[in-house]
Image (cartoon, grey):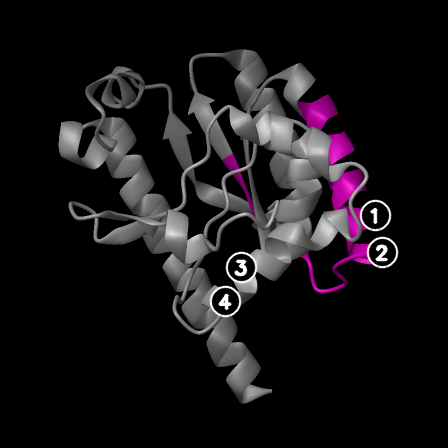
Amino acid sequence: MLGEKSLREVMQRSEQGRFDVIPANRELAGAEVELVNEFARETRLKQALAELDEAYDYVLIDCPPALNLTTVNALTAAHAVMIPMQCEYYALEGLSDLVNTIKKVRAHLNPGLEIEGLLRTLFDNRNTLAQQVSNELAQHFGDKVYRTVIPRNIRLAEAPSYGVPVLLHDSASKGAQAYLALAGEIINRHIINNRQVAAS
């Protein structure tokens, strides 16, 4: 984002998953401070990603849980936003702030930006509040809410400590199976949407 290296120079290959990763570290927070006075600071990530336009079908940008310049850069570069959230009261308040930020980015920086979907994570169906918040999300956002729900699962929490994705740590766990179901749901949505575009 500071223009010191190209994406291809910092890209790393994950042989196990057969995907490429451009990792971040703690210095990203410092980069944000350096960008404050830079020209076109909101479009730095979009400009950097432009060199990969033809190379990948999908580019996933993992954002910090904060509405800062890094997140604005990601929203400016993205075509769509997936919003993972816990079904808790304060998460609803944060969702409202995020949706307002998305509207501002759409109005000023990225008119094509859409909400791809809302993903309910760390979900405990024994919790009444979680069920109430989940119902509110479904009522307000309708089919934007993914049918797949990611449960609270110990295997999901363990996998990072082993340095592997949950699919390699325990592919039969409820958490891993939920993420596989989510991948299938996302792919199906894209197939249906592409058919509708082709038919119109």
Residues rendered magenta in the picture = 92-119
Q: Quadrant of residue 166?
A: top left
The single residue placed furthest to the front in the displayed view is 4
Amino acid type, callout 4: Glu
Q: Are marks 2 and 1 in contact (CB under 8 Å)?
A: yes
Q: Secondary structure at mark 2?
A: helix
- The structure residue drawn at horizontal position 50% and vertical position 32%, both measured from the top left corner, is 120
Whether 169 is among the magenta residues is: no
- Check disc 2 and report the residue beneath it: 108
The single residue placed furthest to the bottom in the displayed view is 199
- Check disc 1 and report the residue beneath it: 104
Distance (Cα) linking label 2 and label 4 = 23 Å
Note whether residue 65 is visible. no
Distance (Cα) linking label 2 and label 1 = 6 Å
Q: Are marks 2 and 3 in contact (CB under 8 Å)?
A: no
Distance (Cα) linking label 2 and label 3 = 20 Å
Between 173 and 13, the one nearer to me in the picture: 13
Crowding at dot 4, Cα within 10 Å, few <14 / some 14-19 / many 20+, comes out as few
- Check disc 3 and report the residue beneath it: 49
Amino acid type, callout 3: Leu
148 horizontally vs 33: left or right: left
Question: Which label's residue is closer to the chain start, 2 or 3?
Answer: 3
Distance (Cα) linking label 3 and label 1 = 22 Å
Q: Quadrant of residue 108?
A: bottom right
Select label 2 or label 3 by which is in front.
Answer: 3
Select label 2 or label 4 by which is in front.
Answer: 4
